Amino acid sequence: MKYLLILLMSLSLGFSHMSNLKSSFIYIDMTYKVTPKFDFGLSLIDPGAIDKINGVIGQLKLSKASGFVYKVESLKSQVLTANHVCQTVNESGAFLESPTFKGSFSQLLAGLNIDPILFDMFYQIDVSINLKDYWGKSYSDTKIIKQSLKYDLCLLESPSQIGQAVEFAEGCLEEAVYNFSASGGFYLAEGIPLRQGFLNRPVSKISSTDNSHYKDFYQYTMSVTGGASGSAVFNEKGQVCGMVTLAQDKIGLSYGPTEKQIKTFIKQ
């Protein structure tokens, strides 16, 4: 059924554009691991306890998301995604604890009878940003270039040539749109579902307390869930109109920065 849906959408959009959409799609998976701060191996914490910690945080789905290739050069590629996907990492690659993670991690240390002060003395949490393209090829050593809280945008850079860069539309308004995304954190090589919806006018304010600071985002009649954040929204010409960064899936709506806001972020 899934592949039939993709095929039907392919026929409506056109195979040449489908190829472009596939080539630009990126799945983002951030992994976390506790590592020693020092090479000489001195620690007052049982290594077995550290293995247990890694077993727990390795299962955390803090950032499973989507993105798309913005630029491809000879020795690197740049990928756009949502900023809230990147908020556990700063631009130097260091881990940033969110209040939710900090509370859960403190409980984990307490359960293993590990003094948090000793842990901070000898260990750190490393973050790896792993990318996969539509066909399942993996790319590592990705880093964050810049972020925007205002537009909920994050620019990543990989030291590899990845796929094909997108083309941005010159204005989009009230038209049919399409979206490739790992909605729900679901990723299957060559099996990413294509969704179709309608682009409404930008909304001055999103009716949610947590997201009220986002201004003039596009609204899409397209139902997605977590994991779709950072995915591109295309018009029928295969050009990027915007990005999905948040959703009200119970009512079948999603939102994100417009192509103009994305261009402004890139130029800053």
Image (cartoon, rainbow, N blue to C red):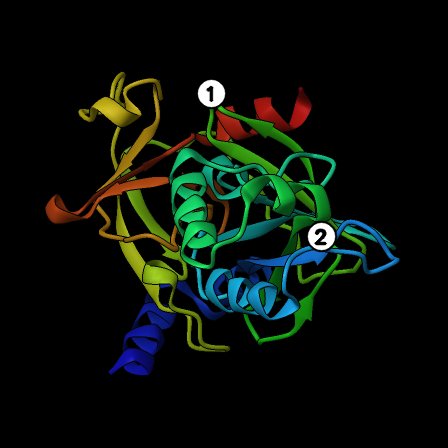
Q: Position of residue 167 (x, y in %)?
A: 59, 45
Asked if residue 27 is positioned above or below residue 81 in the image, the reply reads below
Q: Which residue is mark 1?
A: 150
Q: Position of residue 81 (x, y in %)?
A: 53, 44
Asked if residue 256 is positioned above or below residue 191 in the image, the reply reads above
Asked if residue 87 is positioned above or below residue 131 in the image, the reply reads above
Q: Position of residue 162 (x, y in %)?
A: 71, 61
Q: Position of residue 191 (x, y in %)?
A: 42, 77
The reply to whether residue 242 is in sight is no
- Label 1 and label 2: CA atoms lie apart by 23 Å
Q: Amino acid at mark 1?
A: Lys
Q: Which residue is mark 2?
A: 142
Q: Residue at x 60, y 39 (%)?
A: 117
Asked if residue 260 is positioned above or below residue 131 in the image, the reply reads above
Image quarter hosting the N terminus: bottom left
Q: Is residue 240 toward the left or the right of residue 138 in the image?
A: left
The reply to whether residue 20 is in sight is yes
Identify the residue at the far left of this view: 251
The residue nearer to you, when weighing 29 against 23, is 29
Residue 214: name its quadrant: top left
The residue nearer to you, when weighing 37 against 181, is 37
Image quarter hosting the C terminus: top right
Q: Is residue 50 toward the left or the right of residue 174 in the image?
A: right
Q: Amino acid at mark 2?
A: Thr
* CB under 8 Å between discs 1 and 2: no
